[in-house]
Image (cartoon, grey):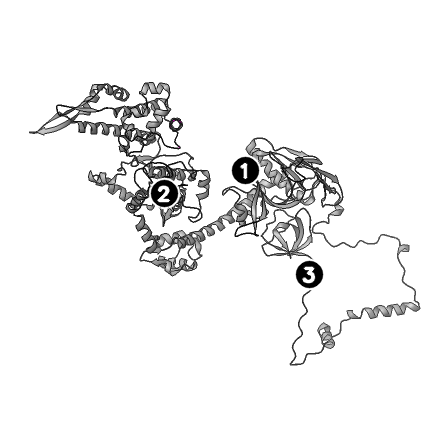
Amino acid sequence: MLISGTLTRMVQTYIGPVLISVNPFKQMPYFGEKEIEMYQGAAPYENPPHIYALADNMYRNMIIDGENQCVIISGESGAGKTVAAKYIMSYVSRVSGGGPKVQGKYFEIQFSPGGEPDGGKISNFLLEKSRVVTRNPGERSFHIFYQLIEGASADQKSNLGITNLDYYFYLNQSGSYKVDDINDRKDFQETLHAMNVIGIFADEQAMVLQIVAGVLHMGNLSFKEVGNYAAVESEEFLAFPAFLLGIDQERLKEKLTSRKMDSKWGGRSESINVTLNVEQACYTRDALSKALHARIFDYLVDEEYVQEGIKWTAIDYFNNKIVCDLIENKVKQANDLVGTLMKCTPHYIRCIKPNETKKPRDWEENRVKHQVEYLGLKENIRVRRAGYAYRRVFKKFLQRYAILTKETWPSWRGDPKQGVVHLLRSVNMDPDQHQLGKTKIFIKAPESLFLLEEMRERKYDAYARAIQKAWRRYAARKKYVKMREEDLLLNKKERRRNSINRNFVGDYIGMEDLPELRQFIGKREKVEFADAVTKYDRRFKSVKRDLVLTPKFVYLIGREKVKDGPMKGQVKEVLKRKIELERILTISLSTLQDDFFILHEQEYDSLLESVFKTEFISLLSKRYEERMQRKLPLRFSNTLEMKVRKDNWGPWSAGSSRQIQFIQGNGNMAVLKPSSKTLQVSIGPGLPKNSRSHQNGVVKGFHNTSQWPPLNSQPTQRIPYQGTKSDRPSLPRPGANFAEQHARIQHNLDFLKVPEQGAAGARRQMTNRPPPAGGRPKPQPKPKPQVPQCKALYAYDAQDTDELSFNAEDVIEIVREDPSGWWIGRLRGKQGLFPNNYVAKI
């Protein structure tokens, strides 16, 4: 798996909770904003293994559990430990509110209770000072040396004595100067810019670069043996390091070739100079160079933050050569580090160096096997198979998963162990997958832990959605009422009655519950508007599309049958268009009451029909103006042009535009007459163009009321007759036919007679009692309701006085259907408007 993967991409995989990372020796495109969005807040099993997944898990655990977190990164030199640490820090900085380019060698970061970084401890334990003076074949020293030589200006090179890379002994030992995908000249300018950003300006930058160049020149000093003592082999090489470091040349030579020692004799102290041999002089030179480089680092990170008043504290821990430090009796430092780590929840990264050539797509199997052995990866796998991947104190376990049951939320009252048992039973976890110790629970498979995490996330998600829904409803009422008052179509287009006097809803298809549609939208993209609309193609053939508006894009989502593969024949959602708001040119509409509009875009246009066009255009205009700092152009005409996408086949390949003509007709339903390049739309008159809504629901400027029955209409009242007596009919005169007619009428009304013993007695007289052994006759089936009905698919809260509120599963009587999408119905004795896409006809 690792072999095949490292030849083509960045390899990261898991052994239980341990992340295994192979250095690809090239810049990989898997650490950008897209990946940050993908892994932020995602469950561990949702995405492929990635260092961002581990970093997000650390950050979320810290926020949720309130516990310190640490990551232990191990691997040999060149395996990618520093890069791994950089990616972790940049991710944490990004998701916690910092900038996207924060980098550095951090050891500890301190966070506020809200998850914002507010301090920390910085250490140079990652700074491999030995790299200044020596390194393995094929390895480079610190990047700043190469950046300075490649990127320095002519004046800087002259002042600092900068020449070629192979001139400097500290750089020419390994024979490696260039690295693929690294541009030292460009990176040097970025380094200078970064120093400017954090407040290190020209004078201090010059001092830093002066010391960096001084270290390079120091490496060119060599020594010869003169009378068993060391002497500088060529004193001309002393000039530049002494000049750059600002010290006397003779004083520098003295300190490199001798050492001052204090001695006590007979209660007296005296200092003597001890001359060094060649080996000791070389060691002193290198020690000075490493110390200078380390002091530059400390100045840039520890001292600069102190000067700026940031709450950071420097701690001197050992570097990553643990064995050497222990040999030199720096045991205290190791104990301090272990003590710090014991206070944290650990996470692990094992870095693997696939080759010595430091080239991509090169794999040395024996070297990798050796690293697998000493990193203990085989043992990790054995423990993973036989042991328990997760363990947690009862109290902490209850605290994390308390939301799963009513009995444990907000806190469990009783024995913590019994509370854990209750939680495990509530999720039906297999007893083979866990064990309870005296104070901790042990869970074997990560999948069981993922189950708990997923159920927990679902609970929180449900409550969050409820809160968000309530807040959005409140905010929408305020925002949409204001937008409705700022009607963009006022005095420009005839209106439908129900489209003008209603509140905006936004999401008419329930995007939150449709992952098949959400997959096309950014993870944190807010859906401003969503509705099922009709789209017309170049031949004016209609097709259903889901129209979605976010602050950045307009989406058109369709459905197609899968043509091959295991899902052949199944219908699948397909993203048809994704239009950046910046690419929208204008919106065209007619002046009649139809629901058509054309979205003009730079490439080609889209002819759409939506009953909620006013709401969509209002929201689109608002977002467009925010992004473009100008208003969205709206064009009104009864002859509209539509630019179509060019095809290279068929009778429609010629010509790149179509025309839509709107004419006055009859009725409220649009009648379409398509031809080859023209679509004629005929529709009756609507409300006047100056019609606008009113707070009490009355439409101003409304006319032609005879075609709309009033809401909540009452039975017609009896009005007294106002005519003369001569107009009134007289009683019929007695005649031969009157009695006969009267008798016939009486015969016809016999069914109205009620017997003395009441209706029950009459029924007993007309029916025979069934025999004792006989069964009762089956009851007649209830007559089907004569009034059409529909069943609510979702709950809806009325947002105006003339609307109906209902819950999911409620059955509503349909009084009248309307092409606007707002029907009139009756529920629990109240009559009002409701959106038809919230219901299904029975």
Can residue 464 be seen in this snapshot? yes
Q: Nearer the viewer, residue 157 or 362?
A: 362
Residue 125 highlighted magenta (yes or no): no
**Which residue carries the number 1 mark?**
552
Q: Position of residue 27 (x, y in %)?
A: 40, 36
Side (left or right) of 56 relative to 225:
right
Q: Position of residue 105 (x, y in %)?
A: 33, 35
Q: Which residues are magenta?
A: 178-185
Q: Are marks 1 and 2 in contact (CB under 8 Å)?
A: no
Mark 1 closeness class: few <14, some 14–19, many ≥20 residues within 10 Å: some
In the picture, residue 222 is in which quadrant?
top left
Image quadrant where one finds the C terminus: bottom right
Amino acid type at mark 1: Lys
In the picture, residue 335 is in which quadrant?
top left
Q: Nearer the viewer, mark 3 or mark 2?
A: 2
Q: Nearer the viewer, residue 720 or 838?
A: 838
In the picture, residue 352 is in which quadrant?
top left
Q: CA distance from mark 1 to mark 2?
A: 35 Å
Residue 507 is marked as none
**Which residue carries the number 3 mark?**
785
Can residue 415 be seen in this snapshot? no
Side (left or right) of 614 relative to 228:
right
Give the residue at x 60% y 32%: 631
Q: CA distance from mark 3 to mark 1?
A: 48 Å
Q: Is residue 90 above or below residue 285?
A: below
- Which of pointers 1 and 2 lies earlier in the amino acid sequence? 2
Q: Nearer the viewer, residue 692 or 393?
A: 393
Q: CA distance from mark 3 to mark 2?
A: 68 Å
**Which residue carries the number 2 mark?**
21
Assign a secondary structure to mark 2: strand
Give the residue at x 39% y 31%: 182
Q: Residue placed farthest to the left in the image?
A: 266
